[in-house]
Image: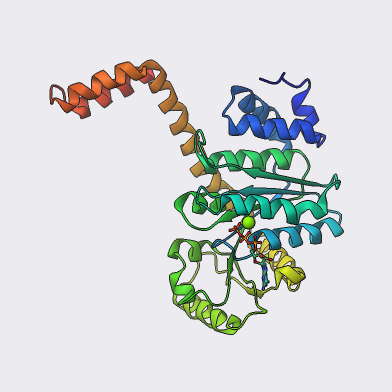
Amino acid sequence: MPQPIENWAERVCAGDVLAVSRAITAIENHQPEAEQLLREVFPRTGKAYLTGITGAPGTGKSTLVDRLAGHYRRANEAVGVIAVDPTSPYTGGAILGDRIRMQGHAGDAGMFIRSMATRGFLGGLARATAEVALLLDAAGKDQVLIETVGVGQDEVDIVRLADITVVILVPGMGDDVQTIKAGIMEIADIFVINKSDREGAERVEREIRALQSLALRHDGWTPPIVKTVASEGAGVDDLAAAIAGYVAYLQKEDLELKKSVQNWQERLVEMLRDVMLEKARAQFGDGNLAKLAAEVAEHKRDPYTLVEEIAAKENT
Ligand SMILES: Nc1nc2c(ncn2[C@@H]2O[C@H](COP(=O)(O)OP(=O)(O)OP(=O)(O)O)[C@@H](O)[C@H]2O)c(=O)[nH]1
Ligand SMILES: [Mg+2]
């Protein structure tokens, strides 16, 4: 195991790339040092904007993230990118693709890019992603962009912790919008129709509008639709403007803090659940748990009383 870094928290907050990289690895591996570090840097967080960018495989997420990152860099904003790789077979290609495209930023100190592997992951992926985002925030990134494939609940959980969620659609996806998971549609603060150089962009736009007319959001925001050709960089400024527009709306309506409180409410419950579960597990080592499970399976004891007993012990 690598040596712990001296003045780790300070070095993270100073944006030291090695310190940040090591910290992310510690988070991924669920190492106790990670938690201590997050505790120390937490007071220095809360400044970065987190933008989640999601969409079906191959819709151009990486290309768009790359362009958007370039846009922010030109405005002199520090950028962190977290690419959450899917567990599905696209992974190999996605990693390679991301590497090649992101190379344009090599040597740029204001830009930090990290892929998070999801395979064999210990603990919740959404939680780890949130922690990495926190870390990049502490490291002084103004914009943190999170790329995730919108296919499963894990991904929905990840984008839900973002301040701004961008959902990418592309023309020619068959019965387009209808086939997109309802869950993903609902979380969109901004829609992007990427690959607008292809035929059918207008149709996708009409379909989104039709869906939007059916469902009013409780915050009163109507997600704008931005057309892009990410591979050429077209529409990227419009997307950045749409993102800024949504942030301005949240500020105007006093929704920024409210959203954050809601977010933390969920995360606190999750963290609490993790801690309690871990405590209970530690108390009832694996063998013991199997023994108890056998007793329940053989109907020698009822699970309700058992769980109550364990929980009661937990509190003492
Ligand atoms: N025609 C066209 N091609 C594009 C556009 N944007 C991206 N592409 C191409 O689409 C392919 C997939 O782009 P990626 O950025 O890797 O897509 P992704 O959504 O990140 O893919 P995964 O991470 O594998 O899900 C690449 O070959 C891009 O060059 C666009 O606007 N128009
Ligand atoms: Mg990608």
Give coordinates of residue 266: x percent, y percent: 49, 44
Write the residue at 55% across / 69% down: 220
Q: Is residue 160 above or below residue 171?
A: above
Relative horizontal placement of residue 294, taking residue 236 as reference (left or right): left
Write the residue at 61% across / 32% down: 27
Relative horizontal placement of residue 107, taking residue 141 as reference (left or right): right
Is residue 174 among the parts visible in the rendering?
yes
Picture quarter with the C terminus: top left
Frontmost residue, 237 versus 29: 29
Residue positioned most to the left: 299
Relative horizontal placement of residue 120, taking residue 33 as reference (left or right): left
Q: Is residue 241 above or below residue 280?
A: below
Q: Quadrant of residue 73?
A: bottom right
- How many numbered marks, from 0 up? 0
Give coordinates of residue 77: x percent, y percent: 82, 53
Q: Quadrant of ligand 2?
A: bottom right
Q: Quadrant of residue 281?
A: top left
Q: Is residue 256 above or below residue 213?
A: above
Frontmost residue, 283 versus 261: 283
Is residue 161 among the parts visible in the rendering?
no
Q: Quadrant of residue 237?
A: bottom right
Frontmost residue, 81 versus 92: 92
Write the residue at 43% across / 21% down: 279
Frontmost residue, 293 versus 57: 57
Q: Is residue 43 above or below residue 167?
A: above
Give coordinates of residue 105: x percent, y percent: 82, 52
